[in-house]
Image (cartoon, rainbow, N blue to C red):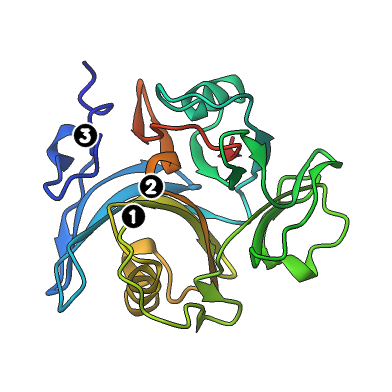
Amino acid sequence: MSTRRSFLASLSAVATATNIPQIARAASADFRIDGEYAYPRIGLVRSVRFYRSGDRPEVQILFASLLRNVTRAQIVQGSEMEIRGSQLWHLADKHNAIIGVNGGFFQGNSFAYDGLLVVGGHQLSPKNTQFTGAAVADADGRVSIEHVDDVKDPFSAMQSGPLFIEPGGRMGMRSHTYDLFRRSFIAQNTDTIVAGITSPVSLYQLAELLMEYPSPFLLDRFDVALSLCGAATAAFFARTGKSDIRDGGAVNSPAVILFP
């Protein structure tokens, strides 16, 4: 078995960062960088462990931090619902992506997409007013996060939500819930796009972490952050040389974001 493929395979509380090369360890009183793999001139994939604090559990976040001016993305529709591992890996291979993350909601057991889904200029599903945000990619692959009301005639778009950090870097969660689930998310500032997956955490707690500690993500602040999906559908893929990092995805998501 590839050691890198087993890297944080379950995002357990105990990291196995020694299993991948190019480790860069760092720490503060509140978090520790367990491991990373660099993509020269593009960005990196990194694992950060945030220590338990108050009512917040220890949280592990596995993510890619990528420069927006050189990073391109595409939104791809999922095919069919499966409960035997994620199709994210197959779609990433098919499109030669280095990073991939699951996203979007589906309706009950039908796997029909719930919310706006546009792929390559073709609208496959209409907006759902319950979900506040969307990941949008233009025809050149430039990706951004927008409030769904601001999305007009996109080339590709995937509605999801909530915007747990609202545009301008404001807290997007109005109340503190204690629903602890694994989360996949995408976030950005002017220069950098971040896509990742977490260990069980509430969206309020995740928003607090990103707003208080942007530096381990290679940012000075987060301007906006969007929850993509959670629990069994949350999945993350990173290509690291000869092998892959594959995490989550017990159930497929109806759409994915790929970074070729």
Q: Which mark is residue 20?
A: 3
- In the rendered image, residue 16, in percent from the top left (x then y), is placed at 14, 40
Residue at mark 1:
181
The quadrant the C terminus occupies is: top right
Mark nearest the camera among 3 and 2 is: 2
Within the image, what quadrant is residue 56 found in? bottom left
Of tags 1 and 3, which is closer to the observer?
Answer: 1
Give whichever of 64, 59 is nearer the camera. Answer: 59
First along the sequence among labels 3 and 2: 3
Residue 110 place in picture, x, y as percent: 62, 33
Q: The N terminus lies in which quarter of the figure?
A: top left
Residue 6 at x, y percent in the picture: 23, 28
Against 171, residue 49 (above or below) is above
Mark 3 Cα-neighbour bin, 10 Å: few <14, some 14–19, many ≥20 = some
Q: Which residue is mark 2?
A: 231
In-front residue for pair 39/141 = 141
Residue 58, quarter of picture: bottom left
Res. 256 image quadrant:
top right
Task: Tell me which residue sits at (60%, 43%) in the image.
Answer: 106
**Residue at image location 54% in from the left, 55% down from the top:** 67
Q: Secondary structure at mark 3?
A: loop
Q: Amino acid at mark 3?
A: Ile
Please give the name of the residue rendered at 72% of the width and 58% of the height, measured from the top-left corner. 128
Residue at image point 50% right, 32% down:
252
